[in-house]
Image (tube, grey):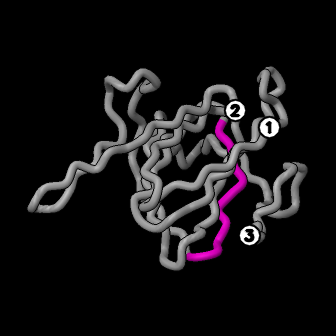
């Protein structure tokens, strides 16, 4: 597992009216601060990645559909430098994943329906000075292939 990545299993609380699922709480041991909350849709087969933040930590939850979240540790000072971590999350595996600053990450929608992802970063997006470094999802130095792995 990549140094600083935290995985929180999420629990659905159902009743006759529907269900509720807590994602991030201010008493979670890894919680630092609130920046903003946003929702993103990813169409089946689409890859959104790679990117990393110098200051921001992300908290990613897939609330509908399924994604393959992939992280790559390119941080020079990290004991897990060079490691790749792959997680499947969404309707079939309810997780919140804390992606620490400096870790490249992205996801691919692996469900037949659109995946809906909520991110709760600890910094708000600054349009004048974005804290985001992007790489092409397929043409880069990260040792990862987004292709489906059959077999």
Label 2 SS = loop
How many neighbours does mark 1 have within 10 angstroms: few (below 14), some (14-19), or many (20 or more)? some
Give the vertical position of 22 relative to 140 (above or below): above
Q: Residue furthest right?
A: 141
Residue 106, image x, y percentages: 65, 54
Question: Which residue is tagged 2?
Answer: 2
Element assignment for label 3: loop
- Label 1 sits on residue: 83
Quarter-wise, where is residue 6 in the image? Answer: top right
Camera-side residue of 52 and 44: 44
Q: Is residue 133 above or below residue 1?
A: below
Residue visible at 52% across and 43% down? Answer: 126
Taking the spot 20% from the left edge, 56% from the top edge, the residue there is 19
Q: Is residue 144 left or right of residue 54?
A: right
Could you tell me residue 113's position as x and y percent?
A: 48, 77
Q: Nearer the viewer, residue 32 or 3?
A: 3
Which portion, as a residue range, is magenta?
44-53
Q: Is residue 46 magenta?
A: yes
In the picture shown, does residue 12 fall above or below 41? above
Inter-mark Cα distance, 3 to 1: 20 Å
Kindly report the distance in space between the C-alpha atoms of the residues bearing marks 2 and 3. 22 Å
Determine the residue located farthest toward the front in the rendered image: 151
């Amino acid at each position: 597992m990549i140094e600083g990545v935290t995985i929180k299993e999420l629990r659905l609380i159902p009743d006759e009216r529907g269900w509720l699922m807590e994602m991030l709480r201010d008493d979670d041991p890894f919680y630092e601060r609130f920046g903003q909350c946003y929702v993103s849709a990813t169409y089946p087969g689409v890859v959104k990645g790679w990117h990393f933040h110098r200051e921001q930590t992300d908290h990613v939850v897939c609330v509908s559909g399924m994604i393959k979240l992939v992280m790559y540790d390119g941080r020079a000072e990290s004991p897990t430098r060079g490691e790749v971590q792959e997680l499947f999350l969404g309707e079939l595996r309810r997780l919140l994943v804390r992606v620490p600053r400096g870790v490249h990450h992205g996801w691919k929608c692996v469900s037949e329906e659109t995946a809906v992802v909520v991110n709760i970063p600890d910094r708000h997006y600054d349009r004048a000075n974005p804290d985001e470094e992007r790489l092409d999802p397929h043409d880069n130095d990260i040792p990862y292939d987004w292709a489906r792995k059959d077999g």
